[in-house]
Amino acid sequence: MTSPFVAVAGASGGLGQLIAMALIKRGVAVKALVRPNTDPSRTEKLRSAGATISPVDLSAVPTLTRELTGAMCVVSSLQGLRDVMHTAQGNLLEAAVAAKVPKFIPSDFSLDFTKTKPGSNRNLDLRREFHAQLKKSGIAWTSILNGGFMDLLVGDTPMVNHKSRKVAYIGEATQLLDFTSMVDTAAYTAAVAADPKPTPNFLRIAGDTVSAKDIANAETNVEGAQYKPGWMGPVWFIEIVIRVMRLFGGENEIFPAWQGMQYMTNMFSGVGKLEPLDNDRYPELVWTKVENFLREYKNNSSKK
Ligand SMILES: NC(=O)c1ccc[n+]([C@@H]2O[C@H](COP(=O)([O-])OP(=O)(O)OC[C@H]3O[C@@H](n4cnc5c(N)ncnc54)[C@H](OP(=O)(O)O)[C@@H]3O)[C@@H](O)[C@H]2O)c1
């Protein structure tokens, strides 16, 4: 394919597909790396938008190196546990270095794990640990931290209960939390990937910064019925609950219930808060606010 292009690993996934589409919208050529034998129906949208679909085994570093040669950036949007976040993503990094790719964006897309305590969030620990490989590699890298996906506030979610009209919170209902929609996160990632200038190691973004109380008010406005914050307990208590729940398993799952609670304690303790924000780096980008996001979701679901 013509150089330069951006290679997106995990392009069959939720965020990866959006990043690839955002790059295409910017006029950037995309090579979508997917597992061999990925059902063509899963990549049809990307193919018809103009992406080159490259089935490749992430354990085959020499083949991967050939695939990445000529790329201006490798974006990883892989999701998984140690075998994926360290091993498969590590192979991707090794191949990017061998192919002399100038920039690597790891699959972080999270709260600020540079501040969360090791041991307090299993999935964030995996990402922080991967940064040791990144630093050693010598490649220029940029980690994008976006708080929670706003998309987690709609549909079946542990945070908003539409039956009881409660927005779950831990600690204080006024603690500010960062949320960015997946689409906005993808648009920003595409801007970073396509940026010909050097980009910093960390870029922090938030489409909206709101408390549980603010989310309850937004739900009230959108649903036309009173929503209230619902207390789950203090942060220290939930941390004990997590430790107990963890004794009953879930280590081989990406999102056992205790993992979701680890994200919540990191957010509600304020430790994973993103500051300062780098939202204004690409002035052409616009940010979706929580209330607008909820309203749009409701309008779209009522049309179905
Ligand atoms: N901040 C937040 O609230 C939040 C929420 C959710 C996700 N995220 C982050 O966003 C990023 C992407 O997540 P996502 O939700 O888009 O995940 P996803 O939909 O599960 O997609 C993950 C992608 O990784 C691919 N993959 C996994 N293991 C692989 C392997 N060994 N070889 C090749 N491909 C492999 C998957 O391929 P297959 O489809 O073939 O399995 C898929 O394309 C992750 O860093 C995740 O932690 C953040």
Image: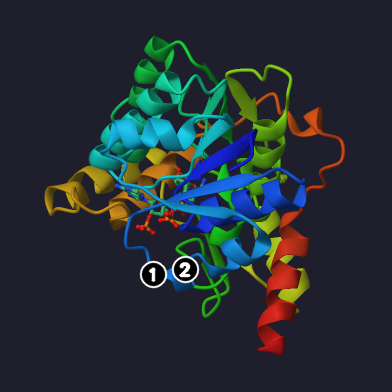
Q: Report if the beta carbon of the residue with label 2 is closer than 8 angstroms to ligand 1.
A: yes
Label 2: few (<14), some (14–19) or many (≥20) C-alpha neighbours in 10 Å = some
Q: Is residue 116 visible to the viewer in this orientation of the structure?
A: no
Q: Position of residue 38 (x, y in %)?
A: 37, 63
Q: Position of residue 207 (x, y in %)?
A: 72, 45
Which residue position holds label 2?
42
Residue type at mark 1 is: Asp
Residue type at mark 2 is: Arg
Label 1: few (<14), some (14–19) or many (≥20) C-alpha neighbours in 10 Å = few
The residue most toward the right is 284
The reply to whether discs 1 and 2 touch (Cβ–Cβ < 8 Å) is: yes
Q: Secondary structure at mark 2?
A: helix
* Residue positioned 77% across, 46% down in the render: 26
Q: Is residue 32 above or below residue 43?
A: above
Q: Position of residue 213 (x, y in %)?
A: 66, 54
Q: Quadrant of the C terminus?
A: bottom right
Disc on res. 12: none
Q: Is residue 49 visible to the viewer in this orientation of the structure?
A: yes
Q: Is residue 25 left or right of residue 238?
A: right
Disc on res. 39: 1
Compare residues 258 and 76 and report the one nearer the observer. Answer: 76
Compare residues 159 and 203 and report the one nearer the observer. Answer: 203
Compare residues 30 and 261 and report the one nearer the observer. Answer: 30
* Residue positioned 47% across, 73% down in the render: 41
* Residue positioned 81% across, 43% down in the render: 285
* Residue positioned 23% across, 40% down in the render: 83
Q: Quadrant of the N terminus?
A: top right
User: Quadrant of residue 73 in the image?
Assistant: top right
Q: Secondary structure at mark 1?
A: loop
Q: CA distance from mark 1 to mark 2?
A: 6 Å
Q: Position of residue 112 (x, y in %)?
A: 52, 30
